[in-house]
Image (cartoon, helix red, strand yellow):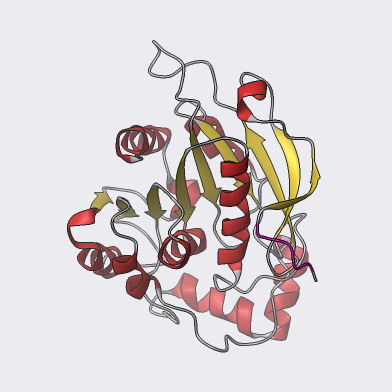
Amino acid sequence: MSDGPAGDVARSTVRPHSETSGRGPLRTYLRTSDGVAIDSVYDPPSVVYDSSASPPVDLVFVVAHGFTGDVDKPHIRRIAAAFRRYGAVLTFSFRGHGRSGGTSTVGDREVLDLEAAVAHARGLGHTRVVTVGFSMGGSVVLRHAALYGAPDAVVSVSAPARWYYRGTAPMRRLHWLVTRPSGRLVGRYGFRTRIHHREWDPVPLSPVEAVPRIAPAPLLVVHGDRDGYFPLDHPRMLAAAAGEHGELWLEPGMGHAEHAAADALLARIGDWAVSRAG
């Protein structure tokens, strides 16, 4: 157990963004406030932004993946490459995922992982931070912004509005994966995801309860109209809770989370972030 602050670097090869622009990704292990080692990858901004200028070096995207994802998955690397056109990108693996330590609490203590990543991004010299989360990560960025108030803008993609939702077949399968010993074995060996065996106690703040606390930071809620996990009442609840400081994009033909986020959508999110973050 570490009692150092969130964002402490356990082992780092990363230099500040002003010294790394144009170079390849650099891997760093961060230490959360509860002592978990978090695997992260920092990508400096690329040299092309809108085909005419360099991306803003003060802006960084901190990307929070969905359940069973990790920083080395091809879809996460694709997202990092897309956002590099608009600023630097810090991706990381949540606890219990990939090379990170600990066990997944499926959206509860993961806010500590995101806080460590945001603190690290600020420590690299970035003055504008945009958190972008997908599915489970989408719920985490909402709760993190409510509890820590750190980001300059928040983007939540394919996130649930409330806990314990079992109204779709994919969510019923996910609950089996999380709550049953046999499911957790499948998670460990089939998805490289180590899942905590205890139930939440206490139950964390729900995403829809978190949203009103995010203001005045701008919030973008993105959801596909063919999302097989969470129907459209979820993003609509989040948008209603956000009020004037939030925007809702309902994407025609889009499915769920990272795999369904087309390059054109990622570009639109990048443009939104550049214009709204600070």
User: Where is residue 178 drawn, in percent x and y?
Assistant: 62, 78
Q: Is residue 50 above or below residue 244?
A: above
Query: Is residue 134 toward the left or the right of residue 6 in the image?
Result: left
User: Where is residue 198 drawn, in percent x and y?
Assistant: 66, 87
Asked which quadrant contains residue 189, the reply is bottom right
Asked which quadrant contains residue 163, the reply is bottom left
Foreground of the two, 194 or 278:
278
Query: Is residue 158 toward the left or the right of residue 70 in the image?
Result: left
| Residue under the point 50% across and 47% down | 259
Dominant SS of magenta comes to loop
| Residue under the point 27% across and 65% down | 232
Q: How many marks?
A: 0
**Extreme residue in the front direction:** 4
Query: Is residue 140 toward the left or the right of residue 252 in the image?
Result: right
Is residue 236 at all visible to an observer of this figure? yes
Quadrant for the C terminus, please. Answer: top left
Query: Is residue 193 toward the left or the right of residue 275 in the image?
Result: right
| Residue under the point 30% across and 48% down | 253
Foreground of the two, 35 or 74:
35
Is residue 231 at all visible to an observer of this figure? no
Specify whether residue 112 is painted magenta.
no
Quadrant for the N terminus, please. Answer: bottom right
| Residue under the point 62% across and 76% down | 177
User: Where is residue 26 drawn, in percent x and y?
Assistant: 72, 34
Give the residues in magenta. 2-6
Specify whether residue 3 is painted magenta.
yes
Asked which quadrant contains residue 272, the reply is top left
